[in-house]
Image (tube, rainbow, N blue to C red):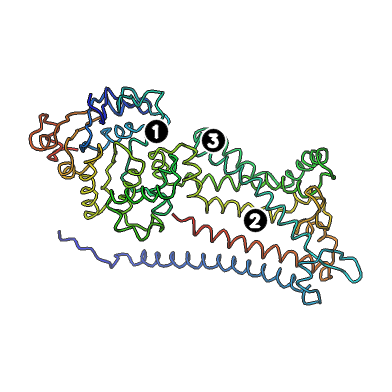
Amino acid sequence: MPNNGLYVRDLSVYYGKKQAVKEINLDFAAKEVTALIGPSGCGKSTFLRSLNRMNDLIGDARITGEIWIEDKNINDPSVDVVLLRQKIGMVWQRPNPFHKSIYENIAFGPRYHGIKNKKQLNEIVETSLRKAALWEETKDRLHQSALSLSGGQQQRLCIARSLAVKPKIILMDEPASALDPVSTAKIEELISELKQDYCIIIVTHNMHQAARISDKTAFFFMGELVEFDDTQKMFTNPSKKQTDDYISGRFG
Amino acid sequence: MKERVTLDHPKEKISKQHLTEEWVGKIYTWLCIIVLIVTIFSMVYFVASRGLTTFFRGVNVWEFISGLRWQPDAKPPIFGALPFIFGSFSTSIMAALIAAPLGFCAAIFMTEIMPKYGRRYLQPVIELLAGIPSVVYGFVGLSIIVPFLRDTFPGQGLGLAAGAIVLSIMILPTITTIATDALSALPGGLKEGSYALGATRWQTIYRIVLPTTFPALMTGVVLGISRAFGEALAVQMVIGNAPFLPRSLFDSTSTLTSVITLSMGNTVMNSPHNNALWSLALILMLMTFVFVFIVRWLERRTKI
């Protein structure tokens, strides 16, 4: 197995008795964007959430199977979830900045992991904001409330926030679906840039978006992985009819 | 295709009926609101006019507020209300200091740690506390807390500490309920955002959950203080009712409310003593206004 990716083996997620994700096998490579597509309720968000064990927070969720990152199975009981989540950042559909200043939003994560030095923090804030293409817009108002930013800026702030703890992998759950087209374009541009350093897994309902930004695409249906291939092949010449129907809008 | 929508109702009667209904509703609401406003204003006017009489008849306002001696039967009577004002504030604030940490923890337990069991069992129990009549609290305080304090600390047991403890139990439901509502109204994304950065549950609670809901938590505390401030019976039963400034936590003292309930039956309308009690009532009322304003101000800051 090559390093720096994420390998999923026989992953199943149950909510109570209902099996939401069914024995998924998937490899995510570093420096690639993988899009997860499929109709609502097909288990793609659940799948995404199990990659950084956010499903732990839901009482009756049960997970079987293995998820390998850096030669460690993250579902192993010996894995420290807190350290794991540092390595795997996450961005949600609705921007969720903390009710603090822009600076504090970014410094929040690093502070937890023991960085107290002011200079070091300033540096992290600046590099994270630069990486998220937000520095120019916010450098003069770092100590204003993050809630004073626009929706698109808030979302980029959330991306910057997750970059600040130096993750390897970034999970995005429909990161642009609550944003206007201009902000969406900015986020997409940002994703293409971040790809150079990170492994990015993105759930999206927007077929065009998946086609534009991703290298690989995985199509989920009813909790199962129907097809997984290079995005270009998936969108031009999918091997399964179901995939073709979904992508061309004939169902779902 | 040929049907046209028209506003001319074929039955004019129905149209008229709608109009009457509209007016009856309007007039009824207006009447109710007028009754309400008149009642409130006459209450305020009455208390204020009675309460101010003391000051029109030669008692200095400053001496009244800052005076240490309350001797209504002396010749001439002396009215110094500071011990009562101090008693009211100190018991209420101490009660809040005891109840707030307990209430916040209960709220965190019910929303963050064990939502299922907390919501099902703990919350009804705490809300039950709000329904217990204050005389029962006073009685329990008198039979359990006062003897305990008497045996453990110097003094008679009746006093400031006993009052504060009884009040803290009484205001616990207010603080807990408001804190629970505030915590559960927190947008779920904030907590997830914190977890996803690798924060532990405690880090998330004290760095994200508590600071974000702080104004709402304070609203609960202020409402609790204002309830404690206005509580009369339970406090009066355990505080000892001495008209002096207490020298220790276990010393007897009085509050504004306890003095009014104790003495009002023994005074004659329009006598200086009676008027002085009204002045105490006026102070109580003004303080309540202040609390209401503080709560309003906090609520405006709570809006997310």
For the residues beneath circles 1 and 2, the answer to whether they share a chain is no
Residue at x 74%, y 54% (from the top left corner):
B232
Q: Is residue A64 above or below residue B34?
A: above
Residue B269 left/right relative to A219 = right
| Foreground residue among A107 and B280 | A107
Residue B118 image label:
3
Q: Chain of mark 2?
A: B
Q: Where residue B33 appears, x then y in whole percent?
A: 55, 66
Q: Amino acid at mark 3?
A: Gly
Q: Where residue B288 appears, x then y in whole percent?
A: 65, 61
Specify the farthest residue to the left.
A237
Q: Which residue is mark 1?
A: A83
- The number of numbered discs placed on residues in the rendered structure image is 3
For the residues beneath circles 1 and 3, the answer to whether they share a chain is no
- For the residues labelled 3 and 2, say whether their Cβ atoms are less than 8 Å apart: no
Quadrant (top left, top right, bottom left, bottom right) of the N terminus of chain B: bottom left
For the residues beneath circles 3 and 2, the answer to whether they share a chain is yes
| Foreground residue among B181 and A79 | A79
| Foreground residue among A54 and A87 | A87
Q: Where residue A79 appears, x then y in whole percent?
A: 39, 26
Residue at x 45%, y 36% (from the top left corner):
B200
Label 3 or label 2, whichever comes before in sequence order: 3
Q: Amino acid at mark 2?
A: Ser
Q: Chain of mark 3?
A: B
Q: CA distance from mark 3 to mark 2?
A: 27 Å
Q: Which residue is mark 2?
A: B226
